[in-house]
Image (cartoon, grey):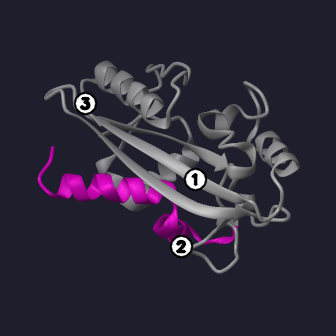
């Protein structure tokens, strides 16, 4: 399968959970286009469809982000562009830290799409992880909003303080990837 992402952090997470040998990187000539969908699922499907059509191979893609209860679910599907169209992870994190109070509820959401151009099959998988906003960013692991996301399923550490196996076991992306892997193992393509 082709993994339709240019994000090296996501590539590592997918390979850790689903297996190194099951995924190929997106060829450099494939252009994924902007994420303009109103939902994570729409964005994930668009990327997977583009990669599948361009390569003729089954493709998977995710769209994921963070929803802050104090911000009525923002930044949501705009998580990667929260502080502006070309904002860095740090700029997005800084803006969330400024706007969402410590202790407020957060949710990570991941929609994962599978598209097979040979059979026309399309499937969606979703993972969620609930938590709260840390008082200050902590940890050097992970990426994106991980330094301020304290998952309910952990012991008070942020996602950025968890080792990769701990993070994969409870994260939104890890949950979606495990759903995909179970579906594939059940005899799907």
> Are the residues tagged 1 and 2 within 8 Å (C-beta)?
no
- Predominant secondary structure, magenta span: helix
Q: Earlier in the sequence, mark 3 or mark 2?
A: 3
Please, is residue 107 above or below residue 36 in the view?
below
> Are the residues tagged 3 and 2 within 8 Å (C-beta)?
no
Q: Residue at x 14, y 48 (%)?
A: 188
SS state under label 2: helix
Disc 1: CA contacts within 10 A as few (<14), some (14-19) or many (>=20): many
The answer to which quarter of the image holds residue 16 is bottom left
Q: Position of 166 compared to 147: left or right?
A: left
Q: Which of marks 1 and 3 is in front?
A: 1
> What residue sits right under mark 2 in the picture?
166
The answer to which quarter of the image holds residue 34 is top right
The answer to which quarter of the image holds residue 105 is bottom right
> What residue sits right under mark 3 in the picture?
57
Residue 5 point in image, percent of width and height: 48, 36
Picture mark count: 3
Residue 19 in sight in this render:
no
Residue 127 or 162: which is nearer the viewer?
Answer: 127
SS state under label 3: loop
Q: Which of marks 1 and 2 is nearer the N terminus?
A: 1
Q: Which residue is drawn at 52% across and 61% down?
A: 171
> What residue sits right under mark 1 in the picture?
108
Please, is residue 48 above or below residue 153 in the view?
above
Q: What stretch is highlighted in magenta?
A: 161-189
Q: Position of 107 compared to 4: left or right?
A: right
Residue 92 point in image, percent of width and height: 77, 41
């Amino acid at each position: 399968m082709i993994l339709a992402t240019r994000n090296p952090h996501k590539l590592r997470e997918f390979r850790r959970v689903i297996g190194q040998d099951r995924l190929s990187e997106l060829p450099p000539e494939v252009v994924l286009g902007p994420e303009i969908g109103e939902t994570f699922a729409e964005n994930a499907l668009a990327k997977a469809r583009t990669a599948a059509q361009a390569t003729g191979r089954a493709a998977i893609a995710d769209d994921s982000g963070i929803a802050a209860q104090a911000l009525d679910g923002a930044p949501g599907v705009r998580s990667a562009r929260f502080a502006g169209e070309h904002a860095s992870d740090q700029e997005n994190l800084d803006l969330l830290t400024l706007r969402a109070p410590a202790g407020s509820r957060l949710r990570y959401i991941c929609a994962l799409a599978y598209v097979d151009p040979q059979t026309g099959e399309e499937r969606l998988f979703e993972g969620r992880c609930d938590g709260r906003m840390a008082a200050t960013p902590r940890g050097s692991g992970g990426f994106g909003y991980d330094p301020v996301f304290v998952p309910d399923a952990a012991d008070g550490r942020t996602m950025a303080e968890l080792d990769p196996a701990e993070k994969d076991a409870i994260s939104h992306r890890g949950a979606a990837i495990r759903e995909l892997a179970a579906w594939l193992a059940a005899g799907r393509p």
